[in-house]
Amino acid sequence: MTKNTKVFYRIFFDESCHLKNDLSSVMTVGYIKVPDLEYSYLFNRLKKIKEQNQYFYELKWNKVIKSQMSFYKELIDFFFETNLTFRCTKVLHKQRLTNDFYYYAIYYALNPMNEKDTEYGVFLDIKDSRSGEKLKKIAEIFNNKNKGNSPFRFFKHIHSEDNLFIELADFFIGAVNYKTRLRYKDKELKAPSPVKLEIIEYLERKSGYLLDSKTPIITKEKKFNLFEFSPTKNYHK
């Protein structure tokens, strides 16, 4: 396969509880991977699902409501019926991280992408005024790790409300983060939300994995991959 015929994927990346000094001990970062050749088709299908359910707002995990449960389950069904894939990295005890903890959380999420003759374009949700600086740092890390031959063609920031796949990534990552924080009895969480628990139960049933666990490495799971990282005290790169 020549360089001009490399397979290209769009990666829509999001994060949850990414601030180091918030009250949560668990940080999750992850993405939805979309085959570029199917992008328009899948985007339009996702858009149609929202329209048919009269859901005209940005999809956010923190704003799920009981009356839209059938819509949430239809989104999950859509994911498992298509060639979309999901990977999430859970960073436990994130307060132990120092220095460039944010960038290396992203690195651990994206690093397994070493498929032959494949390139990627990564879209990240804009979080703050330092987004441009962070973007440059992320690209630099991957370029250095790959000795100037990074498979990542570009890293680009977009607003979450501007892309449905960023919204879907937020939805899945939020579910993983919530279940994992319940497991570790996160002090920031109040009484468990029945709505969120129902979504989580459905997602676990469809994926075959508990969201507060990790997918066994031996299975080489690609469709719905959960990775867990627990740094030692004062971990840094």
Image (spheres, helix red, strand yellow):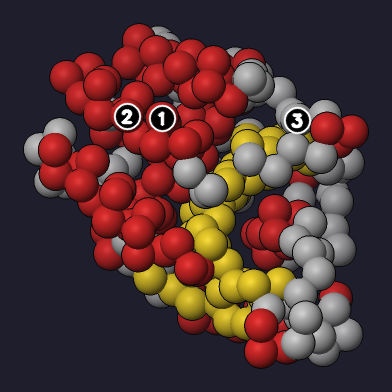
User: Which residue is pictured at 83% across the width and 32% down the height?
Assistant: 219
Amino acid residing under circle 2: Glu
- Residue at mark 3: 215
Query: Mark 2–mark 1 contact, CB under 8 Å?
Result: yes
Q: Earlier in the sequence, mark 1 or mark 3?
A: 1
- Residue at mark 1: 77
Amino acid residing under circle 3: Thr
- Which of the pair 8/157 is nearer the observer? 8
Count of numbered labels shown in the rendering? 3
Q: CA distance from mark 1 to mark 3?
A: 20 Å
User: Which residue is pictured at 75% across the width and 61% down the height?
Assistant: 113
Residue 59 is tagged as: none
Amino acid residing under circle 1: Asp
The quarter of the displayed image where residue 199 is located: top left
The secondary structure type at the circle numbered 3 is: loop
The answer to whether residue 68 shows anywhere in this view is yes
Can you tell which of label 1 and label 3 is closer to the viewer?
Answer: 1
- Residue at mark 2: 74
The answer to whether residue 101 shows anywhere in this view is no
